Amino acid sequence: MIISVISALLLCSTLLVRATFAQLHPTGPASYQRLPSLREQAAILDSWRDERLSKIPDLLNKYRIQAWLISQREYAEDTIWWSIKNATEYAPHRRTVLLFHANTSSLAGRPNPLKWVDNTGAVWPELREILAQYNPRRIALNTDKDVAFGGGLHVGEYEVLAEELGENWMERTVNEPMLGIEYVATRVPGQLKYYRDLQETTWALVEEAFSEQVITPGTTSTEDVEWWFREKMLLLNVTTWNHPRVSVITPESFPGWSGTQDIIDEGDLLHVDFGITAMGLNTDVQHMAYVLRTSQGETNAPEGLKEGLRKANRMQDIVLENMRAGMSGNEVLTACLDQMKAEGIEGQVYSHPIGDWGHSAGAVIGFTNLPTYVPVLGELRILPNTYYSIELYAYSYVPERNETLRFRLEENAYWDQVTEQWNFVYGRQERLHLINATHRPTASLAQPTFVVQP
Ligand SMILES: *[C@@H]1O[C@H](CO)[C@@H](O)[C@H](O)[C@H]1NC(C)=O
Ligand SMILES: *[C@@H]1O[C@H](CO)[C@@H](O)[C@H](O)[C@H]1NC(C)=O
Ligand SMILES: *[C@@H]1O[C@H](CO)[C@@H](O)[C@H](O)[C@H]1NC(C)=O
Ligand SMILES: *[C@@H]1O[C@H](CO)[C@@H](O)[C@H](O)[C@H]1NC(C)=O
Ligand SMILES: *[C@@H]1O[C@H](CO)[C@@H](O)[C@H](O)[C@H]1NC(C)=O
């Protein structure tokens, strides 16, 4: 009902309606999206990267840094290198030294970063000369002890820098992890269209996996489905950052443990946690499915399971309503837990930034093993203009099973500057996927791209 009202409104097609619509379950099935050719992707990726690099002088000024020095060798690269590299580069060659500068004084208008690729030691006198001309007061090195995105300088590189730059410059070095965090976390507008396509492909994968096309109750195992995902990704020209985890939800199964790895049967509640990687972006999604007891004439999931999903949906609303740029992850977490308590919902929140990485840079909102307070990463502030993976579970008692189960959902959201709210990039799961095993594939579907052979 709500869906049909919304789709009528959608015909008006205002931005606001589209944003509101994005919170709901998309009306039709998701379909596999074709990505541009690799050559076109490279041009797109490089233009996003250039847009991000152009903001580095402002970023340095924001944190009162004049120079950001990144030094690395082939196969011992700084974490940040992956967000700076050209699309056709696979490793920093030889020793690659990058010097980002605030684009002022003697370096105004010079390439940013200044770049050396060296295996003779010639970089050091040149770097010392540049520093002497430029005279930066604070030079950031990626030496953070806790944050990966601010701690990518390898120990050997640090020692070489200390020897080659000497006391004079080393005294001016500082640790400012927010440079790496903010650079990696901040999205550029052009990404959203492609990120939405990747989310739709992610959904299409779940919809096919959690269907009678792939699952035959009593025959197919959870592990078969996991490997089906992996093989299918190859055909779709995407990869992953995390092996898919498919399990049967039981009262004992909890996040971080795969749940029951078993043959899938009628009446099972299934769960998947997986994501795809393409075009420098990552998705991370968790959905649930129910295997209809078709042998007993069942045509829908038990009410108790639907109720659990609704509670998890309500928790998603609570997280999105409470997340505000400038708040710490822990402040958001506390606000969410308070509101859940007020509404009588029990569960856990463990949401995280996503984008360049599956678990990307920025403030986390809970951790599976740290349900109420996260040191360091939880004390960071939520940044505007980022992507977040809203990951959580709601406990719900299922009378039909006399069991309390965790309803585990995850969807990816972005900050919409027009509506000033977080929206899901593609949608969120509001109905259980149903595996209807009496529904035999039709002739045209009888030859899917491939079928898992148990
Ligand atoms: C994957 O790439 C191949 C080779 O370019 C292409 O033929 C195929 O259609 C692509 N598949 C999808 C789903 O985009
Ligand atoms: C990317 O390629 C261009 C052109 O070859 C080069 O000037 C630039 O230094 C490269 N960027 C990085 C980060 O290596
Ligand atoms: C760097 O400085 C030059 C000259 O002052 C200016 O034209 C250019 O726009 C600046 N670039 C950035 C990224 O700030
Ligand atoms: C429901 O489960 C509880 C706890 O496991 C058990 O004590 C109770 O007997 C069960 N009730 C029914 C109706 O099976
Ligand atoms: C299951 O498949 C049967 C046979 O095609 C069909 O009649 C029935 O409507 C389907 N049930 C659901 C819930 O999709």
Image (tube, rainbow, N blue to C red):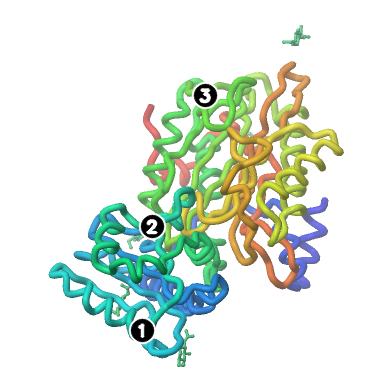
**Residue on which the image places disc 1:** 111
Q: Earlier in the sequence, mark 3 or mark 2?
A: 2
Q: Which is more toward the observer, 245 or 361?
A: 361
- Ligand 1, image quadrant it occupies: bottom left
In this rendering, the answer to whether 228 lies above or below 295 is: below
Q: CA distance from mark 1 to mark 2?
A: 21 Å
Does the CB distance between marks 3 and 1 fall below 8 Å?
no
Image location (x, y in percent) of residue 349: 67, 40
**Residue on which the image places disc 2:** 79
* Secondary structure under the numbered disc 2 in the rendered image: helix
Q: Which is more toward the observer, 351 or 160?
A: 160
**Residue on which the image places disc 3:** 264
Image location (x, y in percent) of residue 280: 43, 61
Q: Earlier in the sequence, mark 1 or mark 2?
A: 2
Query: Which of the 4 image quarters holds residue 112?
Result: bottom left
Which callout, 3 or 1, points to the residue nearer the camera?
1
Q: Amino acid at mark 2?
A: Thr
In this rendering, the answer to whether 32 lies above or below 404 is: below
Does the CB distance between marks 3 and 2 fall below 8 Å?
no
Which part of the image, by quadrant, shows the C terminus?
A: top left
Q: Is residue 311 left or right of residue 220?
A: right
Asked if the residue at label 1 sits under 8 Å from ligand 2, the reply is yes
Q: Which is more toward the observer, 328 or 140?
A: 140
Q: Residues within 10 Å of mark 3 (few under 14, many from 20)?
A: many
Q: CA distance from mark 3 to mark 1?
A: 58 Å
Q: Is residue 440 left or right of residue 92?
A: right
Q: Residues within 10 Å of mark 1 (few under 14, many from 20)?
A: few
Residue at x 71% of width, y 45% of height: 333
Image location (x, y in percent) of residue 380: 61, 54
